[in-house]
Image (cartoon, coloured by chain):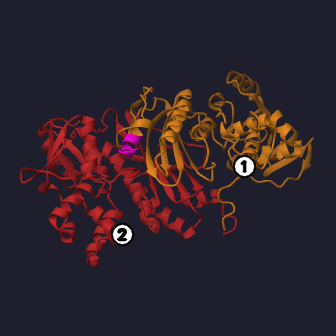
Chain colours: A red, B orange
Amino acid sequence: MKGTDEFSLIKRHFTRPNQRKDVIFGVGDDGAVLRVPEGSQLVVSTDTLVSGTHFLADIDPADLAYKAVAVNLSDLAAMGAEPAWMTLALTLPQVNEPWLEAFSASLFEICQYYGLALIGGDTTRGPLSLTLTIHGHVPAGKALYRSGARVGDWLFVTGKLGDSGAGLQCLLGQLTLPSELHRALQQAHLRPRPRVLAGRMLRGIATSAMDLSDGLASDLQHILTASQVGAVIELNDLPLSEHLLSAMPREQAQAMALTGGEDYELLFTVPEAQKGALATALAEAGADYCCIGQITNGEGIQYRQDGQPVSLSLSGYNHFKDVS
Amino acid sequence: MKGTDEFSLIKRHFTRPNQRKDVIFGVGDDGAVLRVPEGSQLVVSTDTLVSGTHFLADIDPADLAYKAVAVNLSDLAAMGAEPAWMTLALTLPQVNEPWLEAFSASLFEICQYYGLALIGGDTTRGPLSLTLTIHGHVPAGKALYRSGARVGDWLFVTGKLGDSGAGLQCLLGQLTLPSELHRALQQAHLRPRPRVLAGRMLRGIATSAMDLSDGLASDLQHILTASQVGAVIELNDLPLSEHLLSAMPREQAQAMALTGGEDYELLFTVPEAQKGALATALAEAGADYCCIGQITNGEGIQYRQDGQPVSLSLSGYNHFKDVS
């Protein structure tokens, strides 16, 4: 692998023909030059994935690239934005050509699917990690925030919750299951589907929205804090997959749905008057969703089981929580 | 430090009142929402700094924050863009409050000076590194690229070259100098001044531009390749500081200017007809600059000393160069 240097490496693996007309200049200069459509605002989000913290060191590079893009797309989805551009900062302990080939092939596959252009980045040597900064567009004034939930709004989530958390336990060997079940849950963890279209359809309907990364119990607090409201959640209404219910007792599955994390589904609030519009919009987006509770004028989250208050002690994943 | 978690940490150290009107929403949601001025294009650049690769592990956090922003600003300067917004992805081995306080104070100081708003980011646990993605504006069609150099254009650099490379040698203990000299060169390495105003003034004057990060000898090749031209450089015309010439013999200082790297000065080409406009523009920007050579119809770089061709064997810093 003589002659391999940073520049030929970037050129070989991360340069593809530009397919978006709003990319005036992409990879290959000191910066990319881009055009934001008139009447649109720009939405920008950044996520870092560190080996050993966010993924296992021996992860398949194709899964890693997919997930890095997917979790960033999920942030755009939560803002109601349409994906446009991405930068990739990739830190590698060494140059491993087959690894890079698998990584970049997978990266471009998901980018192409969502119409996302790779417009720049940086490759450096060091412990394996990657930081993506993703850019999307939203019609001016139409972005979805965490702060708009109002008392009486219904609380919804897309998809099912908890599969990803159970999938991680499978990967870590903490949960042993028949191979088909193992595979399905693991897949939910490795290949989450960002709710890009659903997010866009929620513009003008949802009063608040965010994506579920740390787990419902932890993430919902952000909406409650930003909106200065409380919420009640009916545990029996948490959407659980057949797979998850085959893997563990219902009570454990509910806890996984609340705290497992990395679901990358959308959590959002909708006023009573918009429930019809919501049904139409998410049917068009092909997204299943369900109501799990309601916004209250209280503080924090009240859990209920069959309408009766229950007390739970739960918390989501938090990188720095145990640091002292 | 009980109760320290990722969220309170972000809130405490990286949330400041928004001071730019084009930031509709900054830190605190799934993404930032931003407005690009009409008639402007967006310029985006990303740089990663990894502990042990790009800076010494015991670096003063104030110096680290300053430099991370400065090197990213330098990329914007090279495109002729005006700084606007920045995201920060910070990976830390542990929560160290005094470190974070010094880091963020310095970060906001340089951001404020250049009118740059911190609009988002991510904090994660892992080996120390940081990735900044910086956003600027440029009037549509006015960005400076590496590809516009034409045969006969004069080759210029701002400032002096080589001080930063010598400063790094001081820091590494490879160069022993009187303390005042040591401090001055070290400062050039730790606190490079990005040529933001000069870059903007070069719009419409320079035919190509880039910033010097790896060293002139290595960086110039990018302009030559992108523009499909060659260049001749007169070694006697390389701008060397009094400090550098006090620290080492002239020949060694010239080599440092060519390969030391991390100067973060601008390298650019200007046609004969624009030399007057250049003098006016850079005087207004308060930037010293000098002509170091000319663009030719050859290939690669020809070095000359007193007009006579000389043969040099040089190369810039390259992260993956020695990997096999």
Residue drawn at x 48%, y 55% as measured from the top left: B126
Q: Helix or strand or loop: what does disc 2 sit on?
A: loop
- Mark 2 Cα within 10 Å, few/some/many (few <14, many 20+)? few
Q: B269 or B67: which is nearer to us? A: B67
Residue B45 in percent (x, y) is at: 55, 43
> Which structural element holds mark 1?
loop
Q: Is residue A177 left or right of residue A103?
A: left
Magenta-highlighted residues: B1-9
**Distance from Cα at disc 2 to Cα at disc 1:** 42 Å
Look at 74% across and 33% down and name the residue there: B159
Task: Identify the residue under disc 2.
Answer: A172
Q: Quadrant of residue A1?
A: bottom right
* Residues beneath discs 2 and 1 located on the same chain: no
Residue identified by numbered label 1: B172
Q: Is residue B56 visible from the viewing direction of this image? A: yes
Horizontally, is A146 left or right of A42 in the view?
A: left
Establish if B129 lies above or below B109: below
Q: Which amino acid does label 2 sit on?
A: Leu
Horizontal and vertical percent position of residue B211:
67, 41
Look at 66% across and 39% down and name the residue there: B190
x then y, percent, for residue B32: 39, 38
Q: Which amino acid does label 1 sit on?
A: Leu
In this image, B198 relative to A190: left or right? Answer: right
Is residue B139 at all visible to an observer of this figure?
no
